[in-house]
């Protein structure tokens, strides 16, 4: 009895000691302030540019009511990768705040802007990020600036999560917004208003392994001509299956075609290639094209069960073991990915720039029929200002920060490190960006791109489609069962928001 | 942590002892002091308002907690289940539409089947089966060895769920040099992608290893209470160990068997922690999704940003009702009220 | 000869029963100190993973500045959560247990019945409603919120344990100590404490361990990385991508996380057994 007590006490104290040690360790550990300092240095080179901006901003800033009392203003920003190289989506705000603080000092204001918040990255995925946002909004702790996919705007606007930004954008139009590609503005519109500022965009190429094609007996010219052939509709989805099958049959690769392993929007490209459309701008409703969906489901079924080029469990895979790994190691021929994947491969050290040039090619997603139009999908991420920022009276300052990070100086840091595409015309000229050959190379794809609809019920549409496709791949449903499932669920859950066409 | 001077004098056992004495002494003082205040306050209340009020003083904190985080959620789960609530937290009443949707849900039959399969298999192989095996074997080997073995079976239960699931996920990786496949390789069996092709095996193994200890302890306690005479008589009659198990031990632990089965059914029916970590309901389409996990997914997870708290709550209500019914049945069947004898002396 | 055969038999039985449980922990340790593993055989010994973990900052491949939450911050969060849960549970359950054991009042047996039924009831089914409540009272995304929920869900068990221990002390004992001229504090310290100490310890340890290991509630009610606990960190690394985080690092973190558990396992098994018997079993 007595002995037992002593040992218990000993354990308790050991644990306390351990944790005290941990606590001390934490407090004496150097704080990572050096990072920001280094970045600031980089920015000093751009001083001339920034001074110009300052002159333009001066009037606007001096009008801001809450900049007149001296205090620290904290702006909360949430951004997500989920690929870690996209960290500048958040970091740029810290940099912009430094710049803004300097401007404020020059203006004689004693206000300091501080950025808090978080950059969310893998292992946190979109689901968790969005869940966190909605939950913290409900708890009154929403960030002031929230980065999200443009397709959320319908839902966010409809349910009063975010504020319309037309007035703000008009006010700062001459600063940078005049320069944003007009198509991108379309992605942030809902019910005739602009609800967000585009942050970046991308194209989703079909990557292919040149070395595998060489082994299949393709000549260098044929390989280099493939993107062009796809662009002209001479290489179709059917050809894709055939080539992938040849490579698998010849034992050159383990898998013919890889696609993403988690829920996403990439597979909509196949539906679009089959002539489907996602929404009708006239009625504002989403579109369900029965024929196109049937063909898409059949294509996936064939790919898995007739040709054996897609793994039946691709949607349950691991990002590394079933997506990045097999492709970068040459164990797969095609990969339906996004421009940012190139950034990930380089940053993670899976491929070097030289290796990438040597063995990887990229093209649009092929058309369904000869002569048809190839496709890609763009999914601009956008900065929104929450209604809670407005309640806190921070909407204007938050918007000034968003404006600053939209400047090419800041945005190109993100675009180059993470291989996303430019959002402004002048950015294309900007040195950091224009030196990146890959981004220059894929720029043409934007002519073939589509956005997904900004509809409040888009999430449900997407979830139903995903379930059906996944069920076809795993063999849980035949294509016709899956089609019926889709139609039934669409009618039951979001019947009022969807138009059915043949 | 530089400061070399600390290390110049060698620390002896005496120092450590003194340190602990000091620490413990200080803590004891604080504790006694607190208790003293407490006692003063309590007796003040008693002397001022009588012992009736004292009861409240003692009980109210706990009752408050239980009301806010137990009773209120009961009611709320049911009420939210009647709405189409999402993260805007609007009470859009939809009546029993969610329940109609459960009946028409294309995946509900599969998920229900999964749930029964999971509960039944885990229960029979591990929570009862393995528990019985461990307690019987350890009862027939020298006691100090036996209790050490039983102690080891406690480990999975007290290991944090995330760590324990991680251990198995690593052991079951698809590579040929991962633990399980490596052992199979020694036997000449080609590597298997466990999580992809046999996810249920891992899910049930993990839950089973964690769940074994409860039954093991209950059964061992029952076995230890079998009078020594029974064994002696059996041995005199020339009974083998197997016959002792079959004709003496098993019949004597019928009641604990029933208890463990009943108790663990409810616990397995509602817990989804390990499945969430191991497979998240996958691979493929709801392959290992159980009812409680489905409710969690519906209410909290969505790629496109639309979550259905209302529907999730309706799914959870089904479990809450099953939970209440089973809890009351246990209370009746296992005569919990016998444990609640009136206090011998009144205040 | 028979004795020898018996010993072999016992040894075999023990091996079969314990190796499947123990080997995984050995595996975890070996992963943390080796460069690679072939089955259970480590290749290339290294402390690198431990050094990196104890440094606190874990870098993210592919990102220049973004880092995972500091290990020490995570340790403090976990410790705070576990200690608060344990203390609150001990205080509340001994108060309630004492009154249920010592006072007679109307509704007492109904209350006991309710507590017993709640004890059997799986609180996890209330997750959605609990989330709703925390959001409404502004405790979402705080450790306090997780603590309160956890304490409430484990109170029925704690109250039941403590009531049992108070029942075990005869009133005569308490009275006679007082009559003998002990101060009431003396009576408490010498008479009551030794008798309920085991109960307090059991509740304390149970509270600490369950708080230390808490996963689902933390995962559901916490949004930001600055409040992460070990369970969330390990989970994140479990489902994360291998090329972002080395298994050795994850193993070292998992072992760090296991330290209190191992200590309790080695030195406080009798309490663990008690907790098992009265606590909720199963997965």
Image: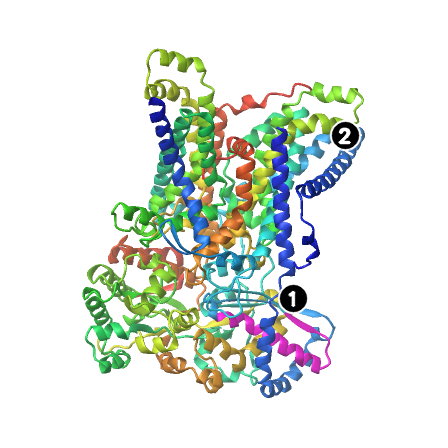
Q: Which numbered circle lies on residue A424?
A: none
Q: Are marks 2 and 1 in contact (CB under 8 Å)?
A: no
* In the rendered image, the vertical position of residue C58 relative to residue B246, given as above or below: below
Q: Where does residue B318 sit, x and y in percent of width and height?
A: 44, 41
Q: Where does residue A425 sit, x and y in percent of width and height?
A: 47, 85
Q: Where does residue B24 sit, x and y in percent of width and height?
A: 70, 39
Q: Which residue is mark 2?
A: C185
User: Quadrant of the rendered structure where residue A342 is?
Assistant: bottom left
Total numbered circles: 2
Q: Quadrant of the N terminus of chain A?
A: top right
A107 part of magenta stretch = yes
Residue A7 vs residue B180: left or right?
A: right
Q: Secondary structure at mark 2?
A: helix
Q: Which residue is mark 1?
A: A392
* Residue C138 visible somewhere in the drawing: no
The residue shown at (50%, 23%) is B335
User: Which chain does the numbered disc 1 sit on?
Assistant: A
* In the rendered image, the vertical position of residue A357 relative to residue C162, given as above or below: below
Q: Quadrant of the C terminus of chain A?
A: bottom left
The residue shown at (44%, 36%) is B153
Residue B10 vs residue A95: left or right?
A: right
- Front-most of A164 and B191? B191
Q: Pointer 2: residues within 10 angstroms few (<14), some, or many (20+)?
A: some
* Residue A205 visible somewhere in the drawing: yes
* In the rendered image, the vertical position of residue A65 relative to residue B284, given as above or below: below
| Foreground label between 2 and 1 | 2
Q: Where does residue A291 sit, x and y in percent of width and height?
A: 26, 65
* In the rendered image, the vertical position of residue A120 relative to residue C76, given as above or below: below
Q: Are marks 2 and 1 on the same chain?
A: no
Q: Pointer 1: residues within 10 angstroms few (<14), some, or many (20+)?
A: few
Q: Start and end of the magenta stretch? A: A86-114
């Amino acid at each position: 009895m007595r002995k037992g007590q002593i040992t218990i006490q000993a354990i308790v104290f050991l644990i306390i000691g351990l944790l005290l040690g941990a606590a001390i360790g934490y407090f004496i550990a150097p704080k990572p302030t050096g990072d920001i300092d280094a970045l600031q240095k980089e920015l000093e080179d751009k001083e001339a540019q920034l001074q110009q901006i300052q002159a333009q901003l001066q009037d606007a800033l001096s009008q801001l009511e809450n900049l007149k009392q001296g205090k620290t203003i904290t702006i909360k920003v949430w951004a997500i990768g989920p690929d870690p190289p996209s960290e500048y989506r958040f970091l740029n705000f810290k940099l912009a705040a430094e710049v803004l603080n300097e401007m404020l000092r020059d203006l004689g204001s004693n206000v300091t802007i501080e950025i808090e918040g978080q950059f969310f990255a893998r292992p946190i995925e979109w689901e968790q990020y969005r869940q966190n946002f909605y939950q913290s909004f409900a708890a009154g702790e929403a960030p002031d600036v929230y980065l999200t996919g443009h397709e959320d705007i319908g839902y966010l606007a409809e349910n009063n999560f975010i504020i319309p930004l037309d007035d703000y954008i008009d006010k700062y139009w001459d600063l940078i917004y005049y320069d944003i590609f007009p198509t991108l503005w379309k992605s942030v519109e809902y019910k005739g208003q602009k609800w967000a500022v585009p942050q970046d965009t991308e194209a989703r190429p079909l990557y292919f392994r040149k070395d595998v094609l060489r082994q299949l007996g393709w000549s260098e010219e044929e390989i280099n001509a493939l993107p062009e052939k796809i662009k002209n509709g001479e290489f179709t989805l059917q050809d894709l299956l055939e080539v992938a099958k040849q490579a698998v049959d010849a034992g050159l690769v383990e898998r013919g075609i890889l696609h993403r392993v988690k829920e996403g929007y990439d597979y909509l490209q196949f539906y679009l290639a089959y002539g489907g459309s996602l929404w009708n701008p006239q009625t504002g409703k989403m579109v369900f094209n029965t024929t196109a969906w049937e063909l898409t489901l059949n294509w996936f079924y064939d790919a898995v069960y007739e040709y054996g080029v897609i793994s039946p469990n691709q949607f349950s895979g691991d990002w590394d073991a079933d997506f990045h790994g097999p492709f970068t190691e040459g164990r797969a021929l095609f990969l339906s990915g996004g421009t940012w994947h190139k950034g990930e491969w380089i940053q993670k050290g899976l491929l070097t720039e030289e290796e990438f040039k040597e063995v990887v090619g990229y093209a649009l997603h092929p058309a369904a029929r000869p002569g048809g139009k190839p496709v890609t999908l763009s999914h601009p991420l956008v900065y929104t200002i929450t209604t809670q920022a407005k309640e806190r009276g921070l909407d204007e300052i938050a918007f000034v920060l968003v404006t600053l990070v939209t400047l090419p100086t800041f945005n190109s840091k993100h675009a180059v490190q993470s291989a996303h595409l430019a959002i402004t015309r002048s950015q294309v000229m900007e040195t950091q960006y224009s030196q990146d050959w890959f981004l220059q190379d894929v720029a043409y794809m934007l002519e073939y791109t589509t956005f997904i609809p900004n509809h409040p019920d888009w999430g449900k549409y997407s979830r139903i489609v995903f379930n059906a496709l996944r069920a076809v791949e795993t063999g849980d449903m035949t294509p016709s069962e899956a089609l019926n499932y889709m139609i039934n669920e669409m009618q039951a859950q979001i019947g009022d928001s969807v138009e059915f066409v043949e | 942590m530089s400061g070399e001077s600390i290390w110049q004098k060698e620390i002896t056992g005496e120092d450590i002892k003194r340190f602990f004495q000091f620490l413990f002494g200080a803590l004891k003082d604080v504790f006694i002091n607190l208790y003293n205040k407490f006692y003063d306050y309590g007796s003040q209340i008693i002397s001022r308002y009588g012992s009736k009020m004292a009861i409240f003083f003692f009980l109210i904190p706990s009752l408050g907690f239980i009301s806010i985080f137990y009773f209120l959620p009961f009611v709320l789960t049911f009420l939210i289940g009647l709405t189409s609530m999402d993260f805007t937290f609007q009470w859009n009443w939809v009546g029993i539409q969610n329940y109609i949707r459960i009946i028409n849900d294309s995946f509900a039959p599969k998920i229900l089947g999964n749930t029964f399969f999971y509960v039944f298999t885990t229960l029979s192989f591990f929570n009862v089966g393995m528990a019985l095996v461990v307690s019987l074997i350890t009862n027939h080997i020298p006691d100090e060895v036996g209790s050490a073995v039983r102690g080891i079976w406690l480990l999975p239960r007290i290991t944090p769920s995330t760590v324990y699931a991680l251990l198995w996920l690593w052991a079951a990786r698809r590579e040929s040099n991962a633990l399980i496949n490596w052992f199979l390789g020694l036997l000449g069996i080609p590597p298997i992608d466990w999580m992809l092709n046999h996810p249920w095996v891992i899910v049930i193994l993990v839950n089973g290893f964690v769940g074994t200890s409860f039954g093991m302890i209950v059964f061992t306690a029952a076995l230890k209470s079998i009078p020594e005479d029974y064994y002696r008589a059996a041995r005199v009659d020339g009974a083998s160990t197997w016959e002792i198990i079959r004709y003496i031990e098993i019949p004597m632990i019928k009641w604990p068997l029933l208890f463990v089965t009943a108790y663990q059914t409810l616990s397995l029916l509602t817990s989804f922690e390990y499945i969430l970590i191991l497979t998240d309901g996958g691979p493929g389409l709801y392959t290992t999704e159980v009812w409680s996990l489905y409710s969690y997914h519906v209410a909290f997870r969505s790629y496109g940003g639309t979550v259905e708290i209302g529907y999730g709550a309706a799914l959870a209500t089904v479990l809450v009702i099953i939970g209440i019914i089973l809890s009351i049945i246990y209370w009746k069947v296992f005569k919990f009220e016998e444990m609640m004898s009136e206090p011998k002396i009144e205040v | 000869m028979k004795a020898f055969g018996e010993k072999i038999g016992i040894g075999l039985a023990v091996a079969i029963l314990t190796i499947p449980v123990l080997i995984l922990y050995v595996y975890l340790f070996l992963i943390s100190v080796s460069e690679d593993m072939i089955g259970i055989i480590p290749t290339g010994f290294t402390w690198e993973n431990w050094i990196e973990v104890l440094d606190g900052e874990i870098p993210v491949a592919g990102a220049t500045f973004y880092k995972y939450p500091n290990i020490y911050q995570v340790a403090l969060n976990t410790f705070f959560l576990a200690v608060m849960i344990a203390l609150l549970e001990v205080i509340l359950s001994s108060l309630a247990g004492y009154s249920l054991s010592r006072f007679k009042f109307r509704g007492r047996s109904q209350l006991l019945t309710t507590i017993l039924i709640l004890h059997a009831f799986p609180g996890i089914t209330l997750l959605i409603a609990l989330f709703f409540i925390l959001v409404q009272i502004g405790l979402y995304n705080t450790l306090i919120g997780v603590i309160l929920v956890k304490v409430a869900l484990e109170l029925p068990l704690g109250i039941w344990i403590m009531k049992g221990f108070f029942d075990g002390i005869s009133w005569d004992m308490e009275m006679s100590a007082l009559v003998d001229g002990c101060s009431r504090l003396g009576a408490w310290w010498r008479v009551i404490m030794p008798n309920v100490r085991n109960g307090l310890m059991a509740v304390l340890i149970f509270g600490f361990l369950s708080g230390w290991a808490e996963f689902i509630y933390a995962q559901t009610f916490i949004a930001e990385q600055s409040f992460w606990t070990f369970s969330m960190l390990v989970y994140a690394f479990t489902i994360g991508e291998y090329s972002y985080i080395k298994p050795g690092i994850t193993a070292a973190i998992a072992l760090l996380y296991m330290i209190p558990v191992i200590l309790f396992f080695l030195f406080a098994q009798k309490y663990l057994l008690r907790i098992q018997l009265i606590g909720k079993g199963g997965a």
